[in-house]
Image (cartoon, rainbow, N blue to C red):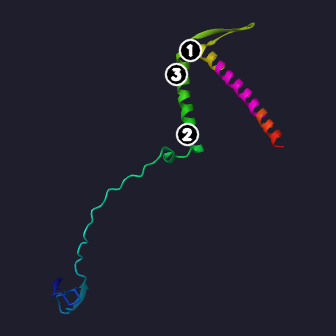
């Protein structure tokens, strides 16, 4: 198959003629638009960034984000607790009133820490309940 171009037509289009060689040769004409001239390019001014204040740049806090931070903190504390338990395996004698026992030092300190945390939770819960009752009485 060969392509033959003819001269430009008056309307600016270029006809393309396709000729097939063989006994059933036919000529097919198609027109193609003239080449497009590029548009003049105007210089582009650089875009100045819009100043963002810190309050606009903050991402709102979500429960998922808070849970992720809490989980990371708990994991870090668990690692520190394991290190503490491994380093303090020597036995210590504990006496309270008439009771005396011998336990690993880390276990004794862990029991004391958990006991103080539970006591703090009980007292804090009682105070929160007291404040809620007071608010309910004031709103009635």
First in sequence: mark 1 or mark 3?
Answer: 3
Please name the residue that numbered disc 3 is placed on: 83
User: Is mark 2 in CB contact (under 8 Å) with mark 3?
Assistant: no
Which of the two residues, 31 or 48, is positioned nearer the viewer here? 48
- With respect to residue 70, does 106 lie above or below? above
Please tell me which residue is depicted at 20% across the width and 89% down the height of the picture. Answer: 9
Please tell me which residue is depicted at 17% across the width and 83% down the height of the picture. Answer: 3
Residue 140: quarter of image: top right
Q: Position of residue 17 (x, y in %)?
A: 20, 87
How far is the residue under mark 2 from the one under mark 3?
23 Å
The overriding secondary structure of the stretch rendered in magenta is helix
Residue 81: quarter of image: top right
Please name the residue that numbered disc 2 is placed on: 68
Is label 1 or label 3 in front?
3
Is label 1 or label 2 in front?
2
Q: Position of residue 46 (x, y in %)?
A: 32, 56
Q: Position of residue 52 (x, y in %)?
A: 45, 48
Which of the two residues, 83 or 24, is positioned nearer the viewer here? 83
Q: Which residues are magenta?
A: 112-129
Please name the residue that numbered disc 1 is placed on: 89
First in sequence: mark 2 or mark 3?
Answer: 2
């Amino acid at each position: 198959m060969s392509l033959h171009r003819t001269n430009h037509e008056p309307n600016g289009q270029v006809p393309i003629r396709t000729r097939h060689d063989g006994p059933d040769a036919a000529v097919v004409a198609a027109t193609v638009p003239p080449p497009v001239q590029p548009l003049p390019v105007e210089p582009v001014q650089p875009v100045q960034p819009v100043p963002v204040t810190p309050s606009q740049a903050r991402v709102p806090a979500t429960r998922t984000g808070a849970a992720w931070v809490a989980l990371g903190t708990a994991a870090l504390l668990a690692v520190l607790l394991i290190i503490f338990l491994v380093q303090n395996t020597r036995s210590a004698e504990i006496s309270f009133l008439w009771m005396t026992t011998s336990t690993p030092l880390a276990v004794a300190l862990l029991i004391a820490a958990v006991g103080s945390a539970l006591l703090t939770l009980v007292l804090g819960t009682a105070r929160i309940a007291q404040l809620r009752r007071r608010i309910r009485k004031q709103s009635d």
